[in-house]
Amino acid sequence: MSVIIPCYNMGRYLQDALDSVYDYKSGDIEIIVVNDGSTDPDTLSLLHDLEVKGVNILHQANQGLSAARNNGIKQAKGEFLLPLDADNKIRPAYIEKGIEILNKNNDVAIVYSDAMFFGEKKGVWKSIPFSLRRLLQYNYIDACVVIRKKAWEQVNGYDVNISAVADWDFNLSIAEAGWKLHYIPEVLFDYRVVGNSMIRTRDIESIRFCEDYIAKKHGASYRKFFKEQITLRGHLKYIFIDLWDAVIGRR
């Protein structure tokens, strides 16, 4: 298992992320921290200290989150991967359960779970069982997932053109390639919410660009589901699905 941690000026949180990985003591874990051109002195100092202690630090000019993940994964030796943002934390069971599921199911490429918010927001982030139709509507799977490296290679990794929502695009590409995505309905990682988080500060223009980009790139899937939904049978089918999701709390 290889854990990839991109870091851009996140030194104040990085040690928490590393410690959460160190808590897993049941097997060999490779950790690769990708320094994506950090300029913050405290972050650079911590990265230097970690490197002296033997932590694998990959230094690169600032290229963005997608490129940082890709470059770290290219160096990874593990059959399975776990991308972890430098300000988040995982729970040991995530690695254990993710590996177990991937080992038992050769057609599964991604294992994902619920998350616990911490920092400026509290509570549980509930995901839902995989549905390509739902994923085409919105991204309900965080980037913190357990991935089969073979599948990452098949779809050419994360798209560097849309760093902010590259995980959404990546998940769609994985599903379109014929792989399954497996949901574990329990909290297995912790998602830090801070005032300057990327999801809060990216502007409307950037969001629209990403949405348009994904709609064009995955146009065949969008057209397929649109055509199915406009038929009477398809329309009734999705009305029933939406009602059922509302009843059991998936929406």
Image: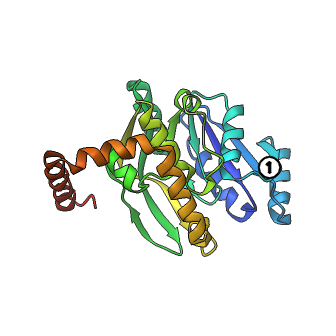
Task: Name which residue lies at 86% across and 45% down.
Answer: 52
Give whichever of 35, 251 is nearer the camera. Answer: 251
Q: Is residue 234 visible?
A: yes
Q: Quadrant of residue 201?
A: bottom right
Task: Name which residue lies at 48% across and 39% down.
Answer: 173
Task: Name which residue lies at 13% across and 46% down.
Answer: 233
The image position of residue 46, as x and y in percent, is 81, 57
Establish if 146 lies above or below 213: above
Q: Quadrant of residue 67?
A: top right
The way the protein has been coloured in the rendering is rainbow
Residue marked by disc 1: 50
**Tag 1: residue type?**
Leu
Q: How many discs appear? A: 1
The image position of residue 29, as x and y in percent, is 62, 35
The image position of residue 106, as x and y in percent, is 41, 23
Quadrant of image for the N terminus: top right
Left/right of residue 63 with respect to residue 92 in the rendered view: right
The image position of residue 231, as x and y in percent, is 18, 47
Quadrant of image for the C terminus: bottom left
Q: Is residue 144 visible?
A: no
Give whichever of 112, 199 is nearer the camera. Answer: 199
Local SS, label 1: helix
Crowding at mark 1 (Cα within 10 Å: few <14, some 14-19, many 20+): some
